[in-house]
Every structure is written in C-alpha cells, then in structure tokens.
Image (cartoon, helix red, strand yellow):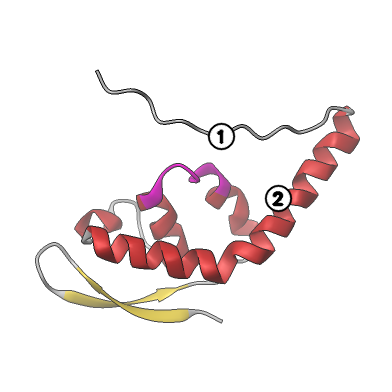
Amino acid sequence: MDKTITVTKTDKSVELVEVKQLPVKKYPDLLAAVDDEPKTVEIFCDKPTGWSDSLTNESIEQLLEEGNALNRDCFSRWLQRRFARYEQMTGEKVQLRSVKPAANG
C-alpha cells in the first residue's frame, strides 16, 4: 500500500518518491526518530541519512503526512503491544509524557 509522491528539492528539481508502509521490524527505528522529522521522512521513504536535507519544508511536511497516514494504525497497535509487554515484565505502568522543545536562549 505504498504511495508515490512528487517532491520538490531545494534546488527546484523534482523527484518521484515512494512513501512506504513500513514492516514491523522498522518500528523501533521509527520510534527512535519520533522527534526527528527529517529522519522520520528518510525512514518512511527508505532513503539514506541526509537525503531529506535536499527537500523543501513543504515536501517534508507532505511526506510526513503520507507516511503517518500509511503507518499510524499498525504502529499504534505495535506501540500498545510494546507497552503491555513492558508492564507484564516489570509490573510497572507505562506513563507517556509530552515532549516539550527546549527553550531558546
């Protein structure tokens, strides 16, 4: 269920990119990149580190939107299973905290 998107690069060229529905084995990578949108885009598109630096902000946003749409449901269920396993193994309840950006200055 992958989706092909035309993205614009910062040099004004365009590229056809396939946004992927990720296999479950890629979910730990996606979780590790949760606060790194450029890295998340590279995971969604199976591109090398740094590739997203060549994209416009609008293209990054478009790829994030499509990648999230393709992966949200299954990733959420995987995350719930992960939390449940952790709770079973440790007896501790998983508590999610919101991540706040660091203050400038």
For residue 63, what is the image quadrant?
Answer: bottom left
Query: Quadrant of residue 40 in the image?
Result: bottom left
Q: Secondary structure at mark 2?
A: helix
The relative height of residue 50 versus residue 68 in the rendered view (above or below) is above
Q: Secondary structure at mark 1?
A: loop
Q: Which residues are magenta?
A: 31-37
Q: Residue furthest top?
A: 105
What residue is rendered at 54% in x and 52% in y? 30
The type of residue carrying mark 1 is Ser
Please identify the quadrant where the N terminus is shown: bottom right
Residue indicated by mark 1: 98
Instruction: State yes or no: residue 71 in magenta.
Output: no
- Disc 2 versus disc 1: nearer the observer: 1
Crowding at dot 1, Cα within 10 Å, few <14 / some 14-19 / many 20+, comes out as few
Residue matched to label 2? 79
Which numbered disc flags the more N-terminal residue, 2 or 1?
2
Instruction: Please report the residue visible at 48 percent of the width from the left and 45 percent of the height from the top.
Output: 33
Q: Is residue 50 left or right of residue 70?
A: left
Q: Is residue 33 magenta?
A: yes
**Quadrant of res 7:** bottom left
Q: CA distance from mark 2 to mark 1?
A: 16 Å
Q: Amino acid at mark 2?
A: Leu
Residue toward you, 88 or 29: 88
- For the question of whether residue 24 can be seen, the reply is no
Q: Is residue 36 above or below residue 7?
A: above
